[in-house]
C-alpha cells in the first residue's frame, strides 16, 4: 500500500516538474553565466524531476529501495536504465547502426598501422590535418552521432549520491540493475575509465554529472560571459561531403576553450577538458540531404599526447610534430570566452 501511495504521489506532480526544473536552471544559468537564456539543447538536458521527486527518490536510495521503483524513476528522470534498448530509433534508417565504443577501440587500436588509413578513408577519419579541410574540397565524415543523446542529467543532489568510481562499479550496477557483460555494463566501465584517467600535462579535466556542475566547471575556467558552440545535426555521417564555408570562431591560442564530450552512461555525463593552443572552426558541410554546420577543433600542441594515440597512427606522425583536428559530435559542446 505504501508503494502504491508513493507511486501515485510521483505521478501527480510529474506534469509540473519539467517547467519547474527548467525555470530553476534558467535562474542558475543567468546568475553564473550572465546571459538571460541558456541554449535550448542545454535546457532540454536539464533533469525534469521536481524538488519533491528528487527528495522522494533520494529517500528510496537511502532505504535501498530505488531498484524496486526503477522503471518509474528512469521514465520520470528521462535516463537510460534498459540494457537491451540503448539506441533510440534514428530518423535516418540509411545510416548503419551506431557502433559501440569498444568496437571502435578494437577497430583502431588492434589493427596494423598500415590498414588504419584505409578504414579511415572509407568510413571517415576521426582525426585529420587542418590543411585538408578546404572550402570546395571533398572529405569523408565519420559518425557524428551520440548513441544515447536523448538522456537527461540528474539533479546535482541526486547525482552526487550515485556511485561514480571504478571501485564502486558493482554497487552502481546493482542500484540500476545492470546486467553483467551487457552493453550498458561496457559503457559504464569505459566512461568511468575515462573519468578516472590522469590528465596530461597542462590539461584540466572533469566529468560532470549535472547541469549545475557543467556550468560551475565553465565559470571556474572561463569566468562569466561565454559563448557556446555545438554541431547542428548528424547529417553527413559516413558520407563524402563537399566542404562549404569555414569560419574561425576561436583563434586565440593563449586563451584555451573548453571542450565537452558526451559519454555513454545511464544519465548525461560530459567529459570536459581544457587544453592549451586550440583553434575552433565552424564548418559547413554539404551532405546528401542538406547542409550541416559542424564544429571542428584543432589542437596545436600535441607534445604531451600519448605516442600511441590513434591520431598519430592515422596520420603517421608523433607527439608535437603536427596539429591534430577532429569534429565535435552531436551532443558535444565547446565553450569560448566572449570577447567584445
Image (spheres, helix red, strand yellow):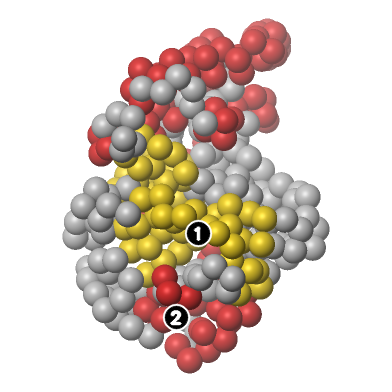
Residue 34 in view, yes or no:
yes
Local crowd size for mark 1, using a 10 Å CA cut-off: few (<14), some (14–19), many (≥20): some
Left or right of 314 in this view: 77: right
Which is nearer the eye, 283 or 194?
283
Residue 54 on image: x %, y %: 51, 17
- Of badges 1 and 2, nearer the viewer stands 1
What quarter of the picture does the N terminus occupy? top right
- SS at badge 1: strand
Residue at x 47%, y 44% (from the top left corner): 229
- What's the residue at 58%, 81% (across, down)? 121
Say few, some or many: other residues with alpha carbon within 10 Å of mark 2 (under 14 / 14 to 19 / 20 or more): many
Residue 49's spot in the image, x, y percent? 57, 20
Q: Residue at x 53, y 38 (%)?
A: 267
Question: Which residue is pictured at 78% across the width and 50% down the height?
Answer: 91
Which mark is drawn over residue 246? Answer: 1
Q: Which residue is mark 2?
A: 314
Alpha-carbon distance for marks 1 and 2?
24 Å
Q: Is residue 270 above or below residue 21?
A: below
Give the answer, above or below, for where 321 lies relative to 48: below
Residue 336 located left or right of residue 119: left
> Is label 2 in a helix, a strand or a loop?
helix
Q: Describe residue 238's horizontal placement relative to residue 168 as left or right.
A: right
Q: Earlier in the sequence, mark 1 or mark 2?
A: 1
> Looking at the picture, how far across and down is residue 195, in whole percent?
36, 50
Against 312, residue 209 (above or below) is above
Answer above or below: position of 145 versus 105.
above
Amino acid at each position: 500500500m505504501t508503494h502504491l501511495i508513493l507511486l501515485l504521489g510521483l505521478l501527480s506532480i510529474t506534469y509540473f516538474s519539467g517547467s519547474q526544473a527548467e525555470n530553476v536552471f534558467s535562474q542558475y544559468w543567468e546568475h553564473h553565466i550572465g546571459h538571460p537564456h541558456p541554449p535550448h539543447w542545454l535546457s532540454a538536458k536539464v533533469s525534469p524531476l521536481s524538488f519533491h521527486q528528487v527528495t522522494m527518490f533520494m529517500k528510496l536510495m537511502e532505504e535501498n529501495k530505488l531498484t524496486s521503483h526503477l522503471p518509474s524513476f528512469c521514465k520520470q528522470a528521462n535516463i537510460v536504465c534498459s540494457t537491451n534498448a540503448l539506441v533510440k530509433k534514428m530518423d535516418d534508417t540509411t545510416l548503419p547502426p551506431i557502433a559501440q565504443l569498444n568496437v571502435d577501440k578494437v577497430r583502431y587500436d588492434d589493427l596494423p598501422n598500415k590498414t588504419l588509413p584505409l578504414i579511415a578513408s572509407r568510413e571517415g577519419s576521426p582525426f585529420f590535418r587542418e590543411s585538408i579541410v578546404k572550402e570546395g574540397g571533398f572529405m569523408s565524415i565519420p559518425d557524428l552521432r551520440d548513441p544515447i543523446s536523448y538522456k537527461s542529467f540528474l539533479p546535482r543532489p541526486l547525482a552526487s549520491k550515485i556511485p561514480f568510481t571504478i571501485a564502486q562499479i558493482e554497487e552502481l550496477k546493482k542500484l540500476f540493475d545492470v546486467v553483467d557483460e551487457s552493453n550498458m555494463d561496457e559503457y559504464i566501465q569505459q566512461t568511468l575509465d575515462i573519468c578516472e584517467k590522469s590528465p596530461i600535462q597542462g590539461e584540466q579535466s572533469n566529468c560532470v554529472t549535472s547541469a549545475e556542475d557543467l556550468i560551475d566547471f565553465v565559470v571556474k575556467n572561463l569566468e562569466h560571459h561565454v559563448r557556446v558552440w555545438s554541431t547542428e545535426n548528424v547529417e553527413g555521417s559516413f558520407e563524402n561531403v563537399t566542404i562549404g564555408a569555414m569560419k574561425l570562431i576561436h583563434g586565440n591560442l593563449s586563451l584555451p576553450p573548453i571542450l565537452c564530450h558526451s559519454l555513454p552512461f545511464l544519465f548525461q555525463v560530459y567529459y570536459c577538458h581544457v587544453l592549451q593552443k586550440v583553434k575552433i572552426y565552424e564548418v559547413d558541410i554539404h551532405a546528401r540531404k542538406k547542409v550541416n554546420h559542424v564544429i571542428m577543433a584543432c589542437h596545436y600542441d600535441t607534445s604531451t599526447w600519448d605516442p600511441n594515440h590513434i591520431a598519430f597512427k592515422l596520420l603517421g606522425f608523433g607527439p608535437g610534430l603536427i596539429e591534430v583536428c577532429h569534429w565535435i559530435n552531436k551532443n558535444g559542446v565547446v565553450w569560448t570566452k566572449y570577447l567584445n
